[in-house]
Structures are given as C-alpha cells and as structure tokens.
Amino acid sequence: MVPVTIHSTDPFATPDGEKSAVRRLRGRLAAPVTLWTTPGPAGLTVSSTLVADGDPGRVLGLIDDESDFWDALEQSGRFAVVALTPADRQLADRFAGLMPAPGGLFAGDDWTDTDYGPVPAGDRTWAGCRLESSRVVGWALLVEAVIEKVTAGPSPDPLIHYRGRYHTLGG
C-alpha cells in the first residue's frame, strides 16, 4: 500500500520562478471573492471585481469567456454579484470548479430567486446588474454592467483571495 501524503501546497502549481511577472503581480494584489449568478441558472466565482460609484453605478469584472456562466449571461443580459464571506469558502471553490458539485452547482444549498439570478438565502449583500458591454482583455473577458439594485446585508469580514489562497481581514 502506498502512503497518502497531504501537501501544504499545491503540488501541481506553477513554481513562482516560472510564472509571468504579470501573474506574480496579480497574485500580490488582494481581491474580494464574489459569486456571480445569472438566470439559467449559472454561476461563477469571480475575484477580479471592481465597483465604480456613479450615476449609474457600475460593476466591472474579468471572467472566463468559455464558462457556462458567460453563455447564460449572454442569453439573459443580467446577473447578481454576491459578496462572499469566510463561511463561503466551499461555495467559492464549488463555483470556481475546484470542488465537486454532485447534483449541480446550486444543489445542497438554499437559494433565493431574483430577477438577476439566484442568490444564497439569508441576509446577504448583493447587487443586481444589467450587462452593458464585454471585450477581451488579456486572457479574460472584461464585463461591464450597470447596477440596477443593491441589497446591503450585514457587513461581516469579506473573503479575500491573495497569492492563490483565501484570507480574511483578520488573518
């Protein structure tokens, strides 16, 4: 029998010295972890999210143009952006494709249907957005949307992505 070893690091990760300088820079910038969902339903974990205040406010994000989420968003033209918390790590991994999703991405959790897409049940902070434009930027698709609705729930520590791992403001 071969012993099983649990690694503290990803044994398949590209070593830092072999990563592009841009990728190393990006990894050193902390980013909020959000869940984007759209009617269909479809969803995707997105850490490249920016909110621009204005009249109207806007959301910008970098997503995978080959994702099921993008296919569904092109059809619906609207989506929800949900701020994730440390309690949502498994949810984030599931929608990022890093964790199995038996029964589908939305199975096993309680969801609230909205006009913009399902959002996790409970008192959550989320925005309902209307797709305005998209264009290829680097190896991603830059999505720009108008914020049509904001629901501001409690303000727990956010889930943050930094150097390939989840973190919280407390550590």
Image: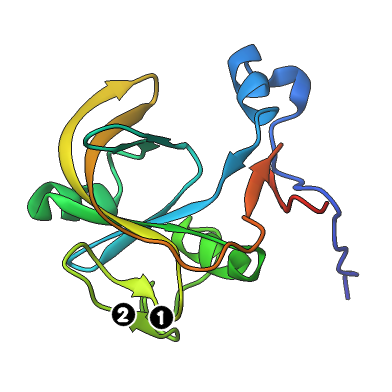
Q: Residue 58: x percent and y percent?
A: 29, 37
Residue 146 vs 110, above or below: the answer is above
Q: Are marks 1 and 2 in contact (CB under 8 Å)?
A: yes
Q: Residue 118: x percent and y percent?
A: 29, 71
Give the residue type at disc 2. Answer: Thr
Element at badge 2? strand
Q: In the image as oriented, which residue stretches furthest toward the top? A: 21
Q: Residue at x 45, y 61 (%)?
A: 95
Foreground: 150 or 96?
150
Q: Which residue is mark 2?
A: 112
Q: Give the spatial CA distance, label 1 vs label 2.
A: 5 Å
Q: Is residue 101 left or right of residue 171?
A: left
Q: Is residue 85 left or right of residue 148?
A: right
Q: Which residue is mark 1?
A: 121
Residue 14 vs 42, above or below: the answer is above
Foreground: 157 or 77?
157
Give the residue type at disc 1. Answer: Ala
